[in-house]
Image: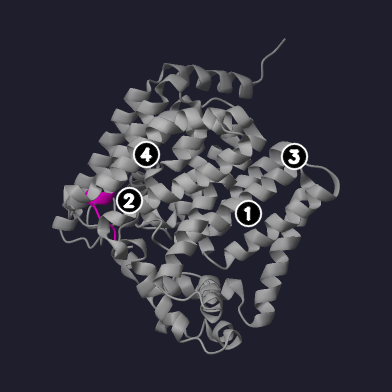
Amino acid sequence: MSVSLAERTSRAAERVRSKVSPTAVVTGTLAVILMTNRIGVWLHDHGHRLYLGMPPLTGRWDPLPLLRAAPSVAVGVGLVWAWPRLASRATWRHLLWIACGAAALWAVALASAEGIQGLTKVSATDYLPVVRDIGSPGTFLASFVDRIGTFTVHVRAHPPGYVLLLWALDRIGLAGAGWLAVLQFGAAASSVPATLIALRETAGEAIARRAAPFLVLAPAVVSWTSGDAFFLGVGAWAVALLILATGREGRHRDRLALAGGLLFGAGLFLSYGLILLGVIPIVVVVARRSWRVAAFAALGVLAVVAGFALAGFWWPAGLSATRVEYANSVARFRPYPYFLLANVAALALVVGPAAWAGLSQLRRSGVWLLAGGALAAVALADLSGLSKGEVERIWLPFIPWIIVATAALPKSSTRRWLLAQVAFAVAIQMAVPSPW
């Protein structure tokens, strides 16, 4: 029987992966990150304005006192010790709740190294001042594009949805930096069970349980103090609902698809970049030939877009205005070729070495539908040139779908890789505090 070219190529790739040592992958990735840092320092020293305090990361080299690391080290090591056994023994429903709570605890422990102000930082100073200036939401939406140059940096870089949400919370008495922190950490922590639900749908419960502790202890939680943490949660649930819909039938499938589409549509008005997150469910829809899911999801997205348009904000016009602002920002000084590499290096740092090793060992499976879709989305974002720097924050919504590759790591090495993740997270938080 003849073998197709695609099958021969796939088998060759499998043989290559089987010969790749995780240690070699980690060593090579660390070398690339170090090289990226050295190139960035050289560019800075020769007059290029990168606006990166510690290339490829945006934060500055300003180590915090080691004693402040005690809470995060204690929480991280405790979870490393307890989680693998917990992940294998808890019921599925309990596992999802525990994962959500553990992720929130881990993120708060890390952020607390900078004191109470470390829990909100830029969101409190960048979004809230605009919220206080909103008189009428209708007027705010209708005039958003015309007034975009008068807003703070992060508001100019995003659609008006997040500011509008904060305005609504303010009106019901949930105002201030404290509630903002609860919103962002809570939404981001909820991305862990959302990702696990989607992974269980495509690859099975056993695989999802193996990835659970790595999703909880991701180094990327150092950026959960930003508004992008909320975008992460919304995007994760939109993807999860759409993927769940591909495995259902009848009205239940249609309701899930419509809900996912509505949530995805809402996400488009939180961050323009979330449109690329759609690559992940599209990959699953195509693999499963779930065209009806795609139709109901599109209906949900269009309903949200139409609603905002009727309220006075047209999404394409907002994107166009933001691109103009972006072109006139620090991005105009940042060299495109360098950031093609620096972005990938920054992403590698915050997904952690376990994810690098997992990707090198991952075989064709339902996990690849998610990880492969996320990598494709990241590649598009990188090539677009609209994400030059700060991707450790901007690309938060894509990160859990890459970390699922850790399910490919041997069970016997779980604690060792988890300790590596904890070490990376603590090192980034303590040595390179970010501006958000």
Residue receiving disc 2? 110
Residue receiving disc 4? 352
Lower position in the chain sequence, tag 1 or tag 2:
2
Work out how far the residue at label 3 is from the one at label 4, CA to CA, in angstroms. Answer: 31 Å
Disc 2 marks a residue whose amino acid type is: Leu
Residue receiving disc 3? 247
Eye-nearest disc, 1 or 2: 2
Lower position in the chain sequence, tag 2 or tag 4:
2
Question: How far across and how far down the image is residue 144, in percent?
Answer: 52, 82
Badge 1: residue crowd in 10 Å (few <14, some 14–19, many ≥20) = many
Question: How far across and how far down the image is residue 186, in percent?
Answer: 50, 57
Relative to 329, 64 lies left or right:
left
Question: How far across and how far down the image is residue 98, in percent?
Answer: 52, 42
> Which quadrant, please, contains the N terminus?
top right
Q: Quadrant of residue 133?
A: bottom left
Residue receiving disc 1? 238
Disc 1 marks a residue whose amino acid type is: Ala
Lower position in the chain sequence, tag 2 or tag 3:
2
Check contact, mark 2 vs mark 4: CB within 8 A: no
Disc 1, SS: helix
Eye-nearest disc, 2 or 3: 2
Q: Residue furthest left?
A: 45
Disc 4, SS: loop
Magenta extent:
429-434
Work out how far the residue at label 3 is from the one at label 1, CA to CA, in angstroms. Answer: 15 Å
Work out how far the residue at label 2 is from the one at label 4, CA to CA, in angstroms. Answer: 15 Å
